């Protein structure tokens, strides 16, 4: 069998190298790719070894300027993200750090695909080929949704996305051009549709650290939700994960039970939240991030205002978010969702990175995506049925309200006096007022569910939600309007240096 040699890069070499292109590899360890097991080992590097929590959360309306901060390595990039500035540093938790690690993952996936082809693309290699295709699609998907405009069929053919890389680099320095948003989405879809049928859970020791069958279908459901032009696909892939109807209760986190029992022990709470045995967790990723340590103490994070909103808002139909799961005192609050450990650069080193475990795909997200698909068909009975199930796992002694739908309407139209921001997706003209109201409720509940995890930013972009950030102890504010160009994270300086067109400002 032909030997295939590929270079694997360490985290330090990837970030510290300033003379390479943004996708290039710096020699560190050499792995010989000769069989399925060595491809399997290579694909461990095909997942971004960085997290997007800090930038996604800090840019969103989940963050306030609290006026004081725990000294943190990412403090400078956190401030720049909070005010939607061009982030100058490319260190842990910064946008540039995540960009680099996404392209590192893409490079590993491309090396795996090339090795599989060189070894004859045999049947035993097909599950790993599927994983490599999904990893490549996922990293590009995350990149385009941070650095490109949100998908809109009317404009995506001309708007800039990100470079879509489908082959390993063969030169020391390579220059890349940005594909359009549509081109990126189409290539993601191609990789997704080609890779998903090849996935097999039984080839992994712990399937939840890979694109297993449920995670792959959850990714497909997210992809088509963000496109917004094929809702039947959203339901199709969601049903694979959740099943039809409301038989997925055991997939939801049990806050009134297991999690409430750990309410006095945040460390154990976090371990349960990120445990591979937690049914809600469909796929876990491990990546360098300081956010798991600083989320509750960062100057730009959950304030008393956001904490109060989390507990008190959306109190309709007997629902009540459990406030005993939020730790902290003024002005710092946190839900302990992150298992964090320190990753040393090499044995004996005193240098390294904080690393966090991330539930990249969860059953709750799949449920919300399917609800959005139900909105398009006005299948409100299914939405309400799913919400009753969801709130039974979020509210102590939950009693379903038979008038739940009308209670939601009353909340937005009476309690908020109709002064609620309507979601503004590209397909808004296809929605009536009732659909917009239900979509807003789904979006608000999802904001609660994924607090701290950076997911709110994607809703802000795709629904064109305005965000106002205040400056502590002043009357100044900075407003991110619906179509503000700063919604597109600026291309990292290192990538601009190698030919990648920056976003307009």
Image (cartoon, rainbow, N blue to C red):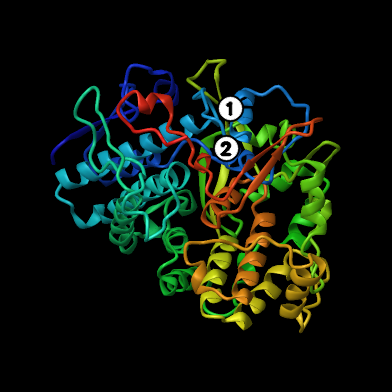
Q: Is residue 194 above or below residue 206?
A: below
Q: Mark 1 points at which residue?
A: 77
Quadrant of the snapshot with the N terminus: top left
Q: Position of residue 405 (x, y in %)?
A: 71, 79
Quadrant in the picture for residue 317: bottom right
Identify the residue at image location x=54%, y=40%.
52
Question: Residue pushed farthest right?
Answer: 329
Q: Is residue 453 left or right of residue 24?
A: right
The disc, 1 or 2, on the residue closer to the chain's N-terminal end is: 2
The front one of 71 and 68 is 68
- Label 2: how many residues lie within 10 Å, few (<14), some (14-19) or many (20+)? many
Q: Position of residue 377 (x, y in %)?
A: 51, 80
Q: Position of residue 84 (x, y in %)?
A: 57, 35
CA distance separating discs 1 and 2: 8 Å
Identify the residue at image location x=78%, y=74%.
410
Q: Residue 467 carries which label?
A: none
Q: Is residue 324 left or right of residue 223?
A: right
The front one of 401 and 491 is 491
The front one of 284 and 185 is 185
Q: Name the residue under label 2.
A: 55
Identify the residue at image location x=44%, y=46%.
142
């Amino acid at each position: 069998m032909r030997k295939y040699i590929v270079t694997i890069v360490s985290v330090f070499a990837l970030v510290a190298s300033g003379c390479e292109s943004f996708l290039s590899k710096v020699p560190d360890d050499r792995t010989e790719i000769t069989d399925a097991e060595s491809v399997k080992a290579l694909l461990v590097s095909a997942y971004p070894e960085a997290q997007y929590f800090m930038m996604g959360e800090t840019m969103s309306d989940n963050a306030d300027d609290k006026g004081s901060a725990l000294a943190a390595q990412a403090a400078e990039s956190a401030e720049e993200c909070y005010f939607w500035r061009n982030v100058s540093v490319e260190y842990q938790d910064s946008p540039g750090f995540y960009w680099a690690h996404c392209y590192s993952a893409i490079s590993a996936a491309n090396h795996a695909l090339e090795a599989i082809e060189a070894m004859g693309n045999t049947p035993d290699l097909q599950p790993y080929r599927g994983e490599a295709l999904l990893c490549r699609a996922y990293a590009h998907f995350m990149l385009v949704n941070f650095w490109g405009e949100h998908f809109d069929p009317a404009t995506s053919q001309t708007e800039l996305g990100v470079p879509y890389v489908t082959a390993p680099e063969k030169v020391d320095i390579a220059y890349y051009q940005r594909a359009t948003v549509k081109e990126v989405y189409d290539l993601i879809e191609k990789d997704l549709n080609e890779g998903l049928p090849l996935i097999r859970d039984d080839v992994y020791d712990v399937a939840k650290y890979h694109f297993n069958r449920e995670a792959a279908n959850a990714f497909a459901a997210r992809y088509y939700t963000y496109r917004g032009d094929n809702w039947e696909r959203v339901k199709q892939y969601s049903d694979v994960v959740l099943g039809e109807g409301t038989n997925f209760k055991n997939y939801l986190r049990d806050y009134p039970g297991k999690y409430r029992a750990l309410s006095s022990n945040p460390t154990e709470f976090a371990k349960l939240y990120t445990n591979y045995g937690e049914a809600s967790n469909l796929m876990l990723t491990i990546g360098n991030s300081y956010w798991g340590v600083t989320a509750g103490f960062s100057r730009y994070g959950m304030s008393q205002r956001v904490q109060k909103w989390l507990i008190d808002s959306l109190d309709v139909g007997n629902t009540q978010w459990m406030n005993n799961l939020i730790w902290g005192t003024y002005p710092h609050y946190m839900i302990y969702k992150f298992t964090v450990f320190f990753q040393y650069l090499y044995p004996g080193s005193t240098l390294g990175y904080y690393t966090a475990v991330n539930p990249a795909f969860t059953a709750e997200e799949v449920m919300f995506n399917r609800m959005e698909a139900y909105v398009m068909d006005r299948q409100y009975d299914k939405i309400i049925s799913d919400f009753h199930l969801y709130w039974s796992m979020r509210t102590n002694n939950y009693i379903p309200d038979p008038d739940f739908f009308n209670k939601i309407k009353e909340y937005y139209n009476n309690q908020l006096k109709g002064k609620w921001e309507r979601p503004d997706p590209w397909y808004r003209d296809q929605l009536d007022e009732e659909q917009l109201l239900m979509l807003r409720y789904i979006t608000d509940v999802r904001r609660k569910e994924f607090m701290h995890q950076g997911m709110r930013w994607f809703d802000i972009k795709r629904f064109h939600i305005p965000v106002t950030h205040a400056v502590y102890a002043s009357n100044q504010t900075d407003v991110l309007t619906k179509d503000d160009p700063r919604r597109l994270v600026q291309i990292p300086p290192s990538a601009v240096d190698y030919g990648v067109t920056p976003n307009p400002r």
